[in-house]
Image (tube, rainbow, N blue to C red):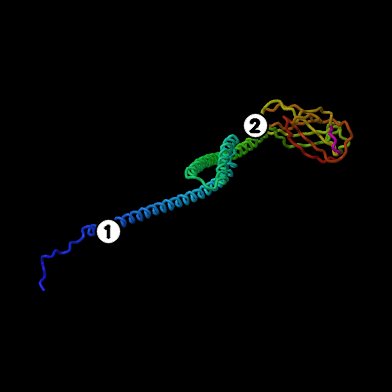
Amino acid sequence: MITNNNNPQPQPDNQSNQKSNRRPIIIGAVSAGLLLIVAGWLVYSSQKALHQLQNEKDQMQLDYEQQQLAQDAEDLDREFAVFENSRQLIMDDSVKRDLTEKYENARMQVEALQAELKNQKNKSAAEITKLKNEIETLRALLRHYVEEINRLNKENQELRSENEQIKKQNTRLNDRVVATSRENEQLSKRMTLAEKLNVTGLTLTPLNKKGKKEKKVQKAAQLMVTFTIPQNNSTPVGEKTIYLRIVSPSGQLLGNGGTFPFEGGSVECSAKKIVEYAGEEIGGVTIYWDVNTALTAGDYTVELFADNYRLISRSFSLN
């Protein structure tokens, strides 16, 4: 069988070919659009999630800072309590009044902060920052007050130490003054005693009417007192009045000799005698007392006075 090559071959349909070529392009475009949509959604979701996480983080930070703020307020309150105790140590009234006024003002601010923290549960970052600054300002003010108190207490301690040293010095000085005064007093007494007339060899003798010694005192007409004034260069020279006192066994003064001054008072005497003392010994000085009352046997006391001194006192037994 002979094939006829002259018959025309069937030709492809151009329209079909064009449709086949467009299909992949459309699919690709759709896919790309879907990818863009998915990608956009993923980006949006991610950003939303990140924003939410950031908000949660920020809120957690604010909550933490608010809790810390409350803790700082409590700490500040305790610091004020310590300050109040220290404030009581200030002794100066004007300084204490000034610090008390400042303390009360700051205390009111702390109480206002604490009330503000309690009244509003959630605070913004700006409010927390404001409260933080206020607390720091109060804490700085408190530190200043405490430093001022410490300085004043240190000065007071130094003053107390100085006062204690001055007191000790004054005590030592007073002790020295007292000791010196005692020494001067003793020296003055010794000097005064050194100036006193000395009397030795004192005797008491009953005499009869003839001036002779009488054995029985009841028969005596006179009582004779004799003594010696020894040399004493410390005694001022000049006229000396010597006063005699004779006291009977019954304690009665044998008087009628007048009075003389002694230790700011006036004392009765039995008799007196004036002697001229030149610093040399005067022996055999006599003073007589005329009997004007009945005498009895017993112990008689004889005393001599001069220049406001008791020169001697001695007892004699007479029969």
The x, y position of residue 152, in whole percent, is 54, 39
Q: Is residue 118 magenta?
A: no
Relative to 263, residue 70 above or below:
below
Return the residue at label 2. 234
Q: Quadrant of residue 307?
A: top right
Asked if the residue under mark 2 is in contact with the one under mark 1, i.e. CB atoms within 8 Å, the reply is no
Give amino acid for label 1.
Arg
The x, y position of residue 82, in whole percent, is 56, 46
- Report, in whole angstroms, how far the alpha carbon at label 1 lies from the one at label 2: 159 Å
Helix, strand or loop status at disc 1: helix
The disc, 1 or 2, on the residue closer to the chain's N-terminal end is 1
Relative to 214, residue 67 above or below:
below
Magenta segment's dominant SS is loop
**Span colored in magenta:** 250-254
Q: Quadrant of residue 311?
A: top right
- The numbered disc on residue 23 is 1
Helix, strand or loop status at disc 2: loop
Observer-nearest of 232 and 106 = 106
Query: Mark 1: few, some, or many residues within 10 Å (few <14, many ≥20)?
Result: few
Give amino acid for label 2.
Ser
